[in-house]
Amino acid sequence: MNDHKLPKIVVLTGAGISAESGIRTFRDSDGLWEEHNILDVATPEAWKRNSALVTRFYNARRVQLLSVKPNAAHLALTRLQEFFDVKIVTQNVDDLHERAGNSNVLHLHGELIKARSEKSQERIYDIGYREIEIGEQSDDGSLLRPHIVWFGEDVPMIVTASKWVTEAEILIVIGTSLNVYPAAGLLYHSPYGCEKFLVDPNDLQVDNLFRLRHIKTKAGEGVPALVDELIQRFYPQTV
Ligand code: APR
């Protein structure tokens, strides 16, 4: 099959796709993220104030990855990419998309399994599941920090993500409250005629303008069903 003729699908994911794997979402419960106020752990000010606390917080999130695994939604996206040109834009910092075999994954908000120099955005290191030591330094002598985009920081990957969405024929939004910009603004970049789906068990304040077809189920149920539906529609001889 000629790859560039495959229908183009962009998938935008948020914390909800990893919920059934056992990773907690941000805004469903009490406004706390794993018992912390987000401003105490996920801002550049928090890092300046108490880099040890922030390091320990992300170390715990990273270690947690060892005890979770991709769920049916992540795995369904691997099946989707057998039939379509699939690009995944995720706000998640976990590695469950990759571990499910998803390719073309762009992490808008960084990755837990990477660290970077406090001084230079380009000095990025693969650290796997190990902890960053308190006070550990990068090659340039500055502190090693989690490779996470904190509130108030630039989101450099948004440029590529916007370009992908601009070319999408189908856009699938999964498990994001669409509260955080610029990620939420990506929907505005979808072209006229792009078919849009939302998989989320809860009602969202999404602008009707987007004409999203809301599949109101958990990702583990709704994503495999939607993937089957799309494959059946585009490749009726397959299923
Ligand atoms: N399946 C699908 N969706 C689910 C499920 C599930 N099993 N469980 C919960 N959800 C939905 C919720 O209804 C909600 O709409 O997932 C969404 C989670 O929203 P948030 O917690 O706000 O997460 P997200 O949108 O990814 O947050 C965006 O904010 O805190 C920052 O940087 C952080 O990347 C994060 C960003």
Image (cartoon, rainbow, N blue to C red):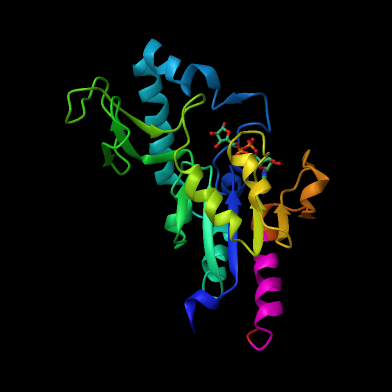
In the rendered image, the quadrant that contains the C terminus is: bottom right
Q: Is residue 42 left or right of residue 127?
A: right
The picture quadrant where one finds residue 220 is bottom right
Asked if one can make out residue 163 in the rendered structure from this viewpoint, the answer is yes
Return the residue found at the far right. Answer: 208
* Magenta residues (range): 223-237
Quarter of the figure with residue 57: top left
Residue at the (51%, 24%) spot, across then down: 152
Rendered location of residue 214, percent (x, y): 78, 54
The x and y percentages for residue 148 are: 42, 33
- Residue 133 in the image: state x and y as whole percent: 26, 26
Relative horizontal placement of residue 26, taking residue 217 as reference (left or right): left
Q: Nearer the viewer, residue 120 or 56?
A: 120
- Residue 10 x/y as whole percent: 58, 59
- For this orientation, the residue located farthest to the top is 49
- Which residue does the image show at 54% across and 70% down from the upper left? 79
> Which residue does the image show at 66% across and 63% down from the upper left?
170
Q: Disc count in the image?
A: 0
Relative to 226, is 155 above or below?
above
Residue 232 highlighted magenta (yes or no):
yes
Q: Looking at the image, is 36 positioned above or below residue 177? A: above
Majority secondary structure of magenta residues: helix
Nearer to me, 46 or 163: 163
